[in-house]
Image (tube, grey):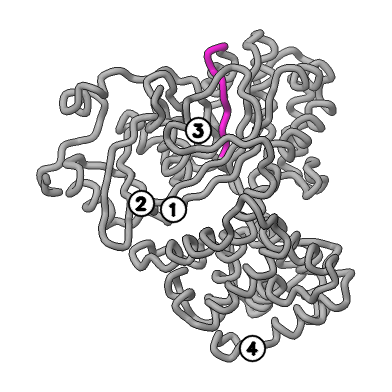
Amino acid sequence: MAGASSARALNRAALADADSTRRQVPPARIVHIGLGNFHRAHQAWFTDRADDAGEWGIAAFTGRSPRSALALAAQDGLFTLIERAADGDSASVIASIVEAADGADLERFVALMSAPSTAIVTLTVTEAGYRLDPSGQPSADDRVLAADLEWSSAAHAESVLLEAGGPQTTPGRLLLGLEARRRAAGGPIAIVPCDNVPDNGRFLARGLKSMAGAVNAELASWIDGNVSFVSTSVDRITPKTMPEDLVTAATLTGWEDRVPVVTEPFKDWILSGEFPAGRPAWESAGARFVDEIGPFERRKLWLLNGAHSLLAYTGLRAGYETVAEALADPHCLRFVNDLWDEAARQLPSRGLDLAAYRAAVLDRFANPRIAYPLRQIAADGVAKLRVRVAPLVLAERAAGRGATASIRPLASWAALVLAGAEFPDTEAAAVEAARNQPPVRAIDELIALIEPRLRADASVMHAIGRLAAESGSAAAMP
């Protein structure tokens, strides 16, 4: 194995010299929005490993900062994926991203969206990045989204797309791309959101169709007839890349990579929907296509993502820094199993193999070599708790039960916020306004941001207040 000091610069010409099977660059037929580590560990990996990988390249656009696009572009889109198991690392070069671009490069985005050869748009923009309310409608108080709609209306009225400015949000840019495709007669296309939002395909469809109807009736009609929205459940724990991972990548592969990605060996992708312009053979890499995705996504959201949020907030209160550290605390482990017991009561008993799934998640969380920071999970708590935890609390309450286990992550989040903890959050202004209220009212306002129906349940609010007042030490929590 080559040492890090002798590693060669990673680019397509050098890779082709070293591996003749990598000579052909696949055509860009997939547009991705939200270029980041998870996309590279998940959709890019599945596309690279598909039997027909040579036919499907990804043109990936960043969501906010252009930094990752610039770094990847310097390597012709190539990067090293390090799979970090408990007993060691393995690595491979992923070649499915053929173009990496700044999300603000709307001219290139429009060109790709207009091309008949483009068949799919995938997204990884986080729950908050869709800027839609829980019903899937454009957020009424989102000024940036409102500005995008105003710009889109003016652009339609003037029959221009890019002469002056352009949309800043993901929904706004998607609307721009779809309008460009309609004008160019680019044909049907599939949109595939890959974020932790229940029924994410239909959720995004409601939002985009509502926006299109407000801007351009012709576009709204075209979307109905030409755009398929595919719902997905995605799963692969992917922490931030650390400086030492660059050395690991070079040592394992012999390539000098400035932007490697570290992930766990486990990966899962479940999809439900139509692909009218074709798709890669993702099933050959392990993806599954199902008629009904709801039970699978609820299993993943409530058990894996719900437990992540639970560990993030209870673990931070107890002074831990990573998922593995928190899970090693027997009290935190009990909280997780209690949460899973509640979730299991609300999931089908057949077809999901919940016992095996729970055991696998525990093994994954306990991997001591995947240092997944709790503060990273804790970010965007309002949007995450809204889909990962609140529906389970509501379901348990509707069944006449106390929902104590699923209430705990809400209470721990509220306690941290009231104690002055700062987490990045798209709804930071609303969180701050709630925090500045008197203590009892502050908890009411915080929970209302997540799910107003919970604030109306006196038993739930009493339990949240009691749990939030407990000591920050996990060992002291009952």
- The residue at which mark 2 appears reads as 262
What amino acid is found at the position of numbered circle 4 in the picture? Pro
**Disc 2 + disc 1, Cβ < 8 Å:** yes
Q: Which residues are the magenta region?
A: 116-123
Which SS class for mark 2?
A: strand
Foreground: disc 3 or disc 4: 4
Disc 1 or 4, which lies upstream in sequence? 1
Left or right relative to 351: residue 132:
right
- The residue at which mark 4 appears reads as 478
Disc 2 or 3, which lies upstream in sequence? 3
Please report the residue visible at 33 percent of the width from the left and 44 percent of the height from the top: 81
Real-space CA distance between mark 2 and mark 3, rounded to the nearest whole angstrom:
20 Å
Disc 3 or 4, which lies upstream in sequence? 3
**Residue in front for this viewpoint, 221 or 434:** 221
Disc 2 or 4, which lies upstream in sequence? 2
- The residue at which mark 1 appears reads as 238
What amino acid is found at the position of numbered circle 1 in the picture? Thr
**Disc 2 + disc 3, Cβ < 8 Å:** no
Real-space CA distance between mark 1 and mark 4, rounded to the nearest whole angstrom:
32 Å
